[in-house]
Image: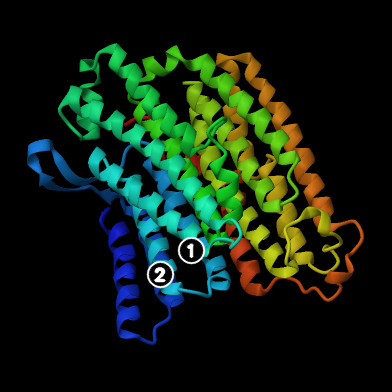
Amino acid sequence: MIQLTGLLVLPTVGIIALIIKKVLHLGLTEEKIVTSVTIATIAIFFLGLLLGFQSFSFPLINSIGFSFTLQLNGISIPFLLLAIVLPGLGLWSAYKEIKENKTLFYIFYLFSYLSLIAVFMSSNLISFFIFWEIILISFFFIIAFWGEKETKRKASMKFLIFTQFGSMLLLGAFILLYVYTGSFNLNTIASSISLIPSQIQDVIFFFVLMAAIIKMPLFPLHSWLPDAHTSAPTAGSVLLAGVLLKLGAYVLILFAVLLMPAVVRTFQIPLIILGLFTILYSTFAASAQRDFKRLIAYSSIFYMALVFIGIASLNSLGETGAIVLIVSHGFIVGMLFVLAGTLKEKTGTRDLDRLGGLMSKMPMYAFFLVLAVIATLGVPGLSNFPGELLVLLGAYAVYPMALIALAGVLIATNYYLSAVKKILFNSLKKAFIKMTDISSFDALQLSLFTIFIVVLGIMPSILINSFNLTI
């Protein structure tokens, strides 16, 4: 069996190696260090899927039951897949974009990488919260230091304020769980949840729900996301949309649906209605965007609202579909942000009104762009389709009006196909006459995204069989 600590040791070694390189001015490049770390971590993860994982626990403060405990729960594997693989694919974009203070950037990136992995393995609430906070702080600096010059400071502060508010609510929920169960251990809390008065359970659920709504995000606490995406470097956007947003869904499933399903059922219909409203709002907002990256950001809100509906359905089909859609969307939106970054690199703009005719100059880019768009629209055979189908089936069984979400899919089809037309077709702009296609390096990066999207679309059972809806 593979020790879960192995998934954290390698990123830690990478951080130490980067610091030593900076201090001693060693000849080894940052890219080689980070590439080695991510490839090795991915290899250990897939080896662990074959051989199994060994839990780990080390007591730290016995008086309050604080221990560093790593243990997989029923839904850990799909989230770990995203947390381990997706940042590694996104790093390829950083190799092209990040030119200043590279060592510091990769240190913050590896801190985010390590902490994301640790969050999805932590069964002690204190260590869970510590790693949760490290993610936010690391990503704040990634936006503030390496984001787009015009907007990075404002976007990073907005990101920090919103997400820190959500963190404080989540901490409040953890404190209440400890006060009424006497433990920070998730398994102990799950077995003692009946000891918590119903009114306190309602408060805990409200805190968790608000933290999830901010993190996913949903209307009306979503406004930090488009700014953060637009400002962040491409690798940061891949990390943000592909993994960070999924933290909200993770805490909602783990600390609400699986821990207190009776409380969630009480508010089930209002939650689904909130998800439906967010779907309609985000799709109309995306339709009004001219910046391709900002359009993708609003589209991410739409898909996370679909996930929210599936979770709120409390139906095995809907909840299973939500997790499938979480993983699928992570890879698809990551690919879309890489394509948006490549577009800016090649043309100098993401303004859809200033683009056109790139099909003739960038056929390989056009292939991957069309593939990513039809994947995000839920075409059968690609990964979004099984997730969307299961979410809609599960939600319909509880609240038939949930099929309103189909209107969001239709609107998304309109704005994505319109974006494809503006980028690839129409008349070729004079500024792009000497444009060249993407490099083989870029094509390989996009091909790796494509493999996951196609495999999960054709064989979703691989993912579905990797988890169960239990703590």
Q: Is residue 85 above or below residue 76?
A: below
Most extreme residue toward the right, as rendered?
A: 427
Quarter of the image holding residue 196?
top left
Element type where label 2 sits in the image: helix
- Residue 131 image point, x, y percent: 31, 49
Q: Is residue 195 visible?
A: yes
- Label 1 with label 2: CB-CB less than 8 Å: yes
Quarter of the image holding residue 195?
top left
State the residue position of label 1: 145
Label 1 to label 2: alpha-carbon separation: 10 Å
| Residue located at (75% from left, 71% from top) | 437
| Foreground residue among 21 and 424 | 21
Circle 1 packing at 10 Å, graded few (<14), some (14-19), many (20+), is: some
State the residue position of label 2: 104
Residue 336 bears which disc, if any?
A: none
Which amino acid lies under the numbered mark 1 shown in the image of this protein?
A: Phe
Q: Earlier in the sequence, mark 1 or mark 2?
A: 2
| Foreground residue among 48 and 361 | 361
- Residue 222 image point, x, y percent: 55, 37
| Residue located at (43% from left, 12% from top) | 266
Element type where label 1 sits in the image: helix
| Residue located at (73% from left, 62% from top) | 349
